[in-house]
Image: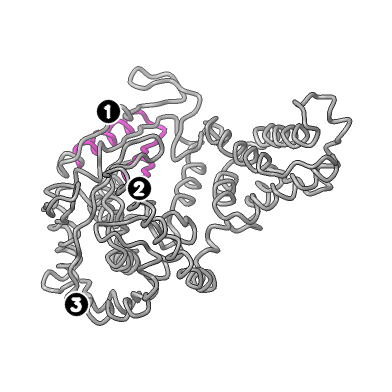
């Protein structure tokens, strides 16, 4: 059984504070996200050492504050987010990190989301790729509004089997399960259902809620994968897949969860009356083909091309063609190799795609964009005589095919992983005062505008 002391031994609150700081460093806009206390990260972090020390001393009697309920559009969907104060986020991150480590062996090895033990989306996709050649039938399932429909009492009952009920750790988790929220400056209200989506600990609690389901599906004669609330069941037998899908639905009923009928699919690579005949299927942002080929869907392909296009368009325009060409290629190198956000997106997809024919087409499209920008006119095939492909490569234009091969051979590390280091934290800590001043100026200008409108 896990208690508060074990969590403190395996992860410190200082480490959790560093993780929060690095997330802000990766996406600076997060630093200006406000909860009900109207405090930015930069204001909070101006005395972060004192705050973390106080948290460590008082963690055995810590009380979470209410979250702020907001609606945000994320990937073309309206989602409800519950925004915690920055102090609460550090405690939530600490709980998530320490419990993830302590529960690593307890979680199912077929649960791939929000893990920190080497099991993640990469592991999931590699397993799908290795097994899909032997599978002709696939069932895809998704839970409807999963994070907002988790039953509190069922989750608390599950916690009693892994957390000491009389330890304050259990009370901390209970506070975050039966959380309170503020909406439109109202009084705090208790949530009767669901998890605080947007909180670092919500994902951990989701995995705890579904672990028994994972174990029951592993007893079926199928290949089973779960990433958060996305389920994939595959086998070479139609009956095995249908039986596994039925078992999944029964387990979801016990958890008081409903399937999203719009994302319920029975697919097959061979004709069958109970399955839709397809030549590929999508899972976790990639297209899987029966021969084991993995390709980028059209929107992911466009995402990478648009990153290159935006980078090209941001280049200063010079009269000299050679100078313009050199600056464009240098900017692309900077974006792909050093801008962590762009590099993480591109390398994530390149790491798993194994269709070089698709990547060659994308390489040519990138070359055409570069030549068009260098010449200052729409591209025509004969422009390759003016700026040959070899010249582009000699100047250092990236090749997605080459970068993909480096990933496949294990010679590249995804740049996103390098962000979690103390040097980066120290660098951003030095900029806290400057960013705090900027934030205060923004707040002052907003108040002045509101005052002028009211007058």
Marker count (numbered): 3
Residue 308 in the image, given as x and y percentages of width and height: 65, 41
User: What residue lies at 19% left-to-right and 48% top-to-bottom?
Assistant: 183
Instruction: Please indicate whether residue 327 sits to the left or right of residue 292 in the image.
Output: right
Q: Are marks 3 and 1 in contact (CB under 8 Å)?
A: no
Q: Depth check: give the residue in front, 179 or 236.
A: 179
Quarter of the figure with the N terminus: bottom left
- Is residue 202 left or right of 118 when viewed as pictured? left
- Magenta highlight on residue 396: no
SS state under label 3? helix
15 in relation to 388, above or below: below
Q: Left or right: 73 with respect to 375?
A: left
Viewer-nearest of discs 3 and 1: 3
Where is residue 391? Give x, y as percent. Answer: 86, 42
Marks 3/2: CA distance? 44 Å
Say the numbered circle drawn on residue 261: 1
Q: Residues within 10 Å of mark 3 (few under 14, many from 20)?
A: some
Mark earlier in primary sequence (3, 1):
3
Q: In which quarter of the view is residue 442 placed?
A: bottom left
**Residue 444 in sight in this render:** yes
Please say if 185 is above or below 389: below
Which portion, as a residue range, is magenta?
222-251
Q: How far is disc 3 from disc 1 in space, using C-alphas? A: 44 Å
Which quadrant of the rendered structure holds the C terminus? top left
Classify mark 1: residues with Cα within 10 Å, few (<14), some (14-19) or many (20+).
few
Quadrant assignment, res 9: bottom left
Please tell me the numbered disc located at residue 60: 3
* Camera-nearest label, 3 or 2: 2
Return the x and y of residue 26 as percentages of the image width and height.
49, 58
**Residue lying at 30% horizontally and 66% vertically, measured from the top left:** 99
**Where does label 2 land, which residue?**
449
């Amino acid at each position: 059984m896990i208690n508060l002391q074990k969590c403190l031994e395996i992860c410190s609150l200082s480490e959790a504070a560093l993780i929060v700081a690095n997330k802000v460093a990766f996406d600076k806009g997060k630093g200006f996200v406000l909860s009900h206390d109207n405090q930015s990260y930069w204001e909070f972090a101006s005395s972060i050492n004192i705050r973390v020390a106080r948290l460590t001393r008082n963690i055995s009697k810590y009380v979470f504050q209410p979250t702020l309920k907001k609606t945000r559009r994320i990937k073309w969907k309206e989602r409800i987010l519950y925004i915690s104060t920055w102090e609460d986020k550090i405690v939530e991150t600490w709980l998530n990190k320490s419990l993830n480590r302590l529960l690593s062996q307890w979680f199912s090895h077929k649960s791939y989301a929000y893990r920190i033990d080497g099991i993640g989306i990469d592991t999931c996709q590699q397993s799908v790729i290795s097994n899909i050649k032997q599978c002709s039938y696939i069932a895809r399932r998704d839970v409807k509004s999963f994070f907002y429909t988790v039953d509190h009492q069922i989750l608390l009952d599950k916690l009693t089997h892994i957390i000491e009920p009389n330890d304050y750790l259990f009370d901390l988790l209970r506070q975050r399960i039966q959380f309170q929220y503020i909406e439109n400056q109202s009084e705090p209200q208790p949530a009767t259902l669901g998890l605080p989506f947007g909180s670092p600990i919500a994902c951990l609690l989701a995995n705890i809620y579904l672990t028994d389901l994972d174990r029951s599906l592993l007893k079926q004669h199928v290949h089973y994968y779960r990433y958060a609330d996305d389920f994939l069941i595959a086998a070479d037998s139609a009956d095995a897949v249908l039986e596994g899908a039925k078992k999944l639905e029964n387990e979801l009923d016990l958890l008081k969860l409903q399937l999203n009928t719009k994302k319920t699919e029975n697919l097959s690579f061979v004709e069958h009356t109970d399955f839709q005949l397809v030549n590929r299927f999508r899972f976790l942002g990639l297209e899987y083909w029966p021969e084991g080929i993995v390709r980028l869907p059209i929107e992911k392909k466009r995402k990478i091309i648009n990153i290159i296009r935006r980078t090209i368009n941001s280049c200063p325009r010079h009269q000299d063609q050679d100078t313009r060409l050199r600056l464009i290629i240098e900017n692309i190198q900077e974006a792909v190799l050093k801008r962590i956000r762009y590099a993480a997106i591109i390398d994530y997809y390149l790491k798993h795609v194994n269709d070089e024919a698709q990547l060659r087409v994308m390489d040519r499209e990138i070359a055409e964009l570069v030549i068009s920008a260098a010449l200052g006119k729409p591209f025509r095939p004969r422009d390759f005589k003016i700026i040959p492909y070899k010249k582009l490569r000699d100047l250092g234009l990236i090749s997605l095919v080459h970068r993909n091969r480096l990933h496949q051979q294990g010679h590249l590390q995804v740049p996103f992983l390098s962000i979690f280091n103390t040097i980066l934290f120290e660098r951003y800590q030095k900029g806290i005062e400057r960013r705090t001043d900027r934030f205060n100026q923004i707040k002052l200008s907003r108040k002045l505008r509101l005052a002028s409108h009211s007058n």
